[in-house]
Structures are given as structure tokens and as C-alpha cells.
Amino acid sequence: MMDTKEEVRLLRGRLDGSQKNRMRKLFDMMYRPSELAKEIGFNKRLVYEVYVPNGCPHERDDRRHIWINGKKFRAWIESTYKKLKLKSDQGYCRTCDKAVKLVDAELKTTKNGDTDYLLGDCPYCGRTIPRIVANRRGQV
Ligand SMILES: [Zn+2]
């Protein structure tokens, strides 16, 4: 099961509307992380720090460089972040497998200062749930 830190890390990779539109133009071909970042408009560090560690389909060549298929990337992003459409006072509880209203939510910021998030509890099972509020990373 993911811990809170891992969930926050995953949520940082969520794309906005215009990035999702640009993602639809990806081809069924292999992209370098820098090419993918340029096509969609995010910082390529997201690929190394968020997408690949969270299971984004990729291949490595004999020099250990990462290559990602555009179509597979899109499918992975859509299925991974599909569940995360939430109202402003909600978070996604992975134990209850649904969106819940956060109880006793507190605003926090990651140590490096690039992400603000709410940390609250699930009203059903008590699990601590993070919810991203502002993300200053992944912008070009
Ligand atoms: Zn729950």
C-alpha cells in the first residue's frame, strides 16, 4: 500500500486541461522523456521522479536511457489519475476506494516548498489522505 509521501508524489504528476489536450496528439512511437516533456509541456523531471517510479510503461536502451511510447503513456496517465477528480474539500481514500470529505484537514507544504497539500482524515476508516492544492513543479 502507498504511504502518504508516495501519494503526494504521485499527485504531483497530475496534468491540467491543456496538457491533457496536448497528450492526445502523442503518436504510437517511442519518445525520450525530454521530448515527451516538450510535447505536453511539463518538466521532464516528472518522468524520472513521478511517472517511472509509479509504474509508467517504459523501456531502457543499452545506455540505460528511458524511452516511453506515446500511446501507452496516455493510457497510463488516464487510468492512473482517473480516480482523482475531486471536489475542493475531498480527497481520495484508497482504503474505501472512493472520494471522501476530508476531516480535520490541515494545509501543508512539502520540504522543498514546491507543493502545497491538504492532509485530512477519511470519515469512514480514519486513514490519513493527502490532497494537492498547489503544484509549482512540472511547469515549463
Ligand atoms: Zn477510508
Image (cartoon, helix red, strand yellow):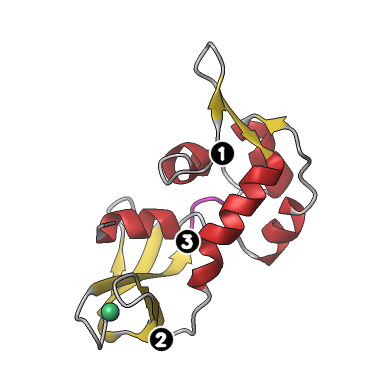
Q: Quadrant of residue 132?
A: bottom left
Label 3, on which residue? 135
Label 1, on which residue? 44
Instruction: Looking at the image, tell me whether mark 3 or mark 2 is earlier in sequence order.
Output: 2
- The label nearer to you, 3 versus 2, is 2
Label 2, on which residue? 89
Is the residue indicated by label 1 positioned so its CB lies within 8 Å of ligand 1?
no
Instruction: Looking at the image, tell me whether mark 1 or mark 2 is earlier in sequence order.
Output: 1
Residue situated furthest left in the rendering: 126
Q: Nearer the viewer, residue 57 or 20?
A: 57
User: x, y percentage for residue 67?
Assistant: 60, 28
Left or right: residue 8 versus residue 67 is left
Task: Tell me the distance, in whole angstroms, between the alpha carbons under discs 3 and 2.
Answer: 17 Å
Q: Residue at x 64, y 44 (%)?
A: 72
Above or below, 51 relative to 33: below
Left or right: residue 101 versus residue 103 is right
Q: Nearer the viewer, residue 76 or 15?
A: 76
Q: Residue at x 66, y 51 (%)?
A: 74
Above or below, 53 relative to 105: above
Q: Are marks 3 and 2 in contact (CB under 8 Å)?
A: no
Q: Amino acid at mark 2?
A: Asp
The range drawn in magenta is 135-139
Residue 136 belongs to the span the image colors magenta: yes
Q: Report ligand 1 position as a quadrant.
A: bottom left
User: x, y percentage for residue 118?
Assistant: 33, 74
Task: Tell me the distance, in whole angstroms, between the alpha carbons under discs 3 and 1.
Answer: 15 Å
Left or right: residue 115 versus residue 2 is right
The quarter of the image holding the N terminus is bottom left
Residue 107 belongs to the span the image colors magenta: no
Instruction: Looking at the image, tell me whether mark 3 or mark 1 is earlier in sequence order.
Output: 1
User: x, y percentage for residue 60?
Assistant: 53, 22
